[in-house]
Image (cartoon, grey):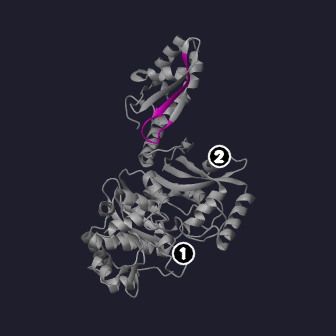
Amino acid sequence: MTAPYFSPDFCARLREAFLRTGYDADGVLTTIGGPAHAALTRDEPELAYQASQDAGELGTVIRLFLLGAAEPAADAAAAIAPVCIDDALSTGLLRGAGEAIRAGFDVRPHGDDDGGSWWVISDLEPEHRRWLDHELSTDHVLGIGQASMSLVRATSRRPVGTLLDMGTGNGVQALHGSRHAERVTATDVSERALALAAATFALNGLDIELANGEWFAPVARRRFDQIVCNPPFVVGPARVDFTYRDSGLGGDDASALVVRQLPGFLEPGGTGHVLASWLHRDGEDWIERVSGWVPPGVDAWFVQRDIADPGLYVGTWLRDAGIDPRSPLGREQAATWLDWFAENKVDGVGFGFVTLRRSDVDNPTVLCEDMRQAYDDPLGDEAAAWLDRVSWLREHPDLLAERFLVPDSVVLEQISAPDDEGWQPTIRRLHRTDGPGWQHEVDELVTALLAGCRGALPLSDLLGLLAAAHGEPIDALTEAALPVVRELVRHGMLMPADETAT
């Protein structure tokens, strides 16, 4: 498809229309209400249709751009003023057939938890394009989906000078990056994606550098303080049905390429945040697989959020493209995909986040963790804190000389069973009540050790007292305790008393 063009003047007038009608995240939520807004996330639009009927011009804009409805031409013209209806039709923002006007693009409000508010332009999603006479194009630009938002929440928001959004798509990662980065660069292999991202940035009055090209080629020989990447990470045969999800590389090679190359474009100490997928193959450890992607001198934290069965994985991505898995096309594509999985002994597809830091040290930390439990806190803050804690552990190799505290967010759960003397604890489990909700099962000795971590005595003294009280050899106790202490520090369940390693 031809890349669209929305001039800066056109975008400025459209912004004026949205501001005038109150078409922003708060305005939409106030107008349609919480239940209707929640129903929209389940693809159930009727409540929002009903709530928008008495909302005047804002209701018209909501039905046009958020619900994909056809509106009378006169109502549409009034709602988007000062944009001229003919200009809106000529750019493709609106499409008309007689008196019925529909949106030609998805334009929706988007906000963050800190008061940021934007509009994002993308191609129409499958449920809003049934009136069109063609299927999704290869260069279809996806709207804000769950994957995009999960990366938004998994990205550290500490202030940086320069940020690269590689594979920007509709530009949503760059929008969030503009809140904490002084300068933002956005790249994409798709000219159509860059055109819509440019319109998104112009609509929001943002000055963001754009560059076209594959992978890191547009920023060769440049370095950034932070890189955010939502790559075409879909796992399967080497093909490109849609550029937003398919890289043309087979298997999980796209994710591997990003993890291997990204650190080379970071400033020393710079960080990267990536969405990625990896194969689970029969007889192969996924941890060994992804750890091998990390280049020397780089700290890396792989967080696996889900493992999908191959059949479920294929069906999900077919529906994502608007393809009915029951149709002849759906069955053909599913068969090719599933055959590839079988030939490559794939029994699952892992999905999650990768946090990277260019540390330039000889002993970087590479850790892979399964985190499929539910949690509410954004992972971005935890990722930044994890890097802090990794640095602290590297800078303080002699843990025996350190004094520690158990944070208030950590609690101990004990499950006891009856015996001849009453109740005997059978399970002791530490819980961190904030962040990702880490849990660690511990024994009686670790429980006693943590009880003494009040910041007064160094770890060596605590271990000496514990050994004497329980009749344990001090050397053996120390050897067993140090790995546990390191892991608890990494997970924020034990902290240095003299400085914060949050």
For residue 168, side relative to residue 276 (left or right): left
- Label 1 Cα crowd, 10 Å radius (few <14 / some 14-19 / many 20+): some
Q: Residues within 10 Å of mark 2 (few under 14, many from 20)?
A: few
- Residue 381: percent from the left, percent from the top? 41, 46
Determine which quarter of the picture holds residue 330: bottom right
- Is the stretch drawn in magenta largely helix, strand or loop? strand
Q: Left or right: 86 with respect to 359? A: left
Q: Is residue 307 above or below residue 98?
A: above
Q: CA distance from mark 1 to mark 2?
A: 37 Å
Q: Amino acid at mark 1?
A: Leu
Residue located beneath label 1 in the image: 136
Residue at the spot 45% in from the left edge and 63% down from the top edge: 44
Check the image and name the residue furthest to the right.
343
User: What span is in magenta?
Assistant: 423-438
Tell us which disc is closer to us: 1 or 2: 1
Please provide percent x and percent y for residue 248: 62, 68
Residue closer to the observer: 47 or 12: 47
Instruction: Give me the residue at 42% from left, 70% from top.
Output: 210
Marker disc for residue 276: none
